[in-house]
Image (spheres, rainbow, N blue to C red):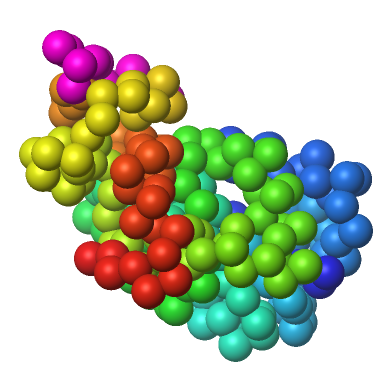
């Protein structure tokens, strides 16, 4: 499988988790500036993008346009890339030349086929995703397709769409999966500490009730 890998504005956690797959899977690197020196974007099966897009960056915008044109599929990997995550709170710019910068998930700029949340994205899930993509396993890929339609996901969204709607079973999966401990189970139901939530979407994706919805090929995802 030919891959393009693009790293935008992020902490490098997703890239670090991805690197072991270069040895485990049969991947042909077409473009990956952090690993190979070749700076030319050529045609590939899938483009993997992690990190948020700096809206004011001509470089980011130009790369994304070329990557979309060169790739059969585009996958936004990690929370910053897929749903915005903590980068939604950032405004960029440092003294002595402060400036206002808006950071967006990739799907706000180009069409994205798949989205995988996580802060950072799991090596295991990325491996299974790439294998499913190569095999054409649509049953496994469907939740990632549907999540790509979601413009934001976090603890508050889970609270609104599942807990407040009376759909929560109190399983605690959201609290177990939260990377920053922003969710606490109180009297059998999750309570989100919004001052801790980084809007990574991990709880949203791991919630069994939400996952049942995302597994449907015709799922309506706002």
Where residue 81 appears, x then y in whole percent?
45, 55
Q: Nearer the viewer, residue 113 or 84?
A: 113
Q: Residue at x 27, y 55 (%)?
A: 152
Taking the magenta stretch, the answer to whether it contains residue 116 is no
Q: Position of residue 218 (x, y in %)?
A: 37, 74
**Which residue sits at x=26%, y=24%?**
170
Quadrant for the C terminus in the image:
bottom left
Residue 90 visible at all? no
Residue 114 appears at what percent x and percent y?
A: 52, 65
Can you tell which quarter of the image residue 58 is in? bottom left
In this rendering, position of residue 8 left or right of residue 100? right
Can residue 194 be seen from the camera position used here? yes
Q: On the rendered image, what quadrant is the N terminus found in?
A: bottom right
Q: Is residue 206 above or below residue 134?
A: above
Range drawn in magenta: 178-189
Q: Is residue 59 above or below residue 32?
A: below
Picture coordinates of residue 32, whole percent (x, y): 74, 61
104 relative to 53 in the view: left or right: left
């Amino acid at each position: 499988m030919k891959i393009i890998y693009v790293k935008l504005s992020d902490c490098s956690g997703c890239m670090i988790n991805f690197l072991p797959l270069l040895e485990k899977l049969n991947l042909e690197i077409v473009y990956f500036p952090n690993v190979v020196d070749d700076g030319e974007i050529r045609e590939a099966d899938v483009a993997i993008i992690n990190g948020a897009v700096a809206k004011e960056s001509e470089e980011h915008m130009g790369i994304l346009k070329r990557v979309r044109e060169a790739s059969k599929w585009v996958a936004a990997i990690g929370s910053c890339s897929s749903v915005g995550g903590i980068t939604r709170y950032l405004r960029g710019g440092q003294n002595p030349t402060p400036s206002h910068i808006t950071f967006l998930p990739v799907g706000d700029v180009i069409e994205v086929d798949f989205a995988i949340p996580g802060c950072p994205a799991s090596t295991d899930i990325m491996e299974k995703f790439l294998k499913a993509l190569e095999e054409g396993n649509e049953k496994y890929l469907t939740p990632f397709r549907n999540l790509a339609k979601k413009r934001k996901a976090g603890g508050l969204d889970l609270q609104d769409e599942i807990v407040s709607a009376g759909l929560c079973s109190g399983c605690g999966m959201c609290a177990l999966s939260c990377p920053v401990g922003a969710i606490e189970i109180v009297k059998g139901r999750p309570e989100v500490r919004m001052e801790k939530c980084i809007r990574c979407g991990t709880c949203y994706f791991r919630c069994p009730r939400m996952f049942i919805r995302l597994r449907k090929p015709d799922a309506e995802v706002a």
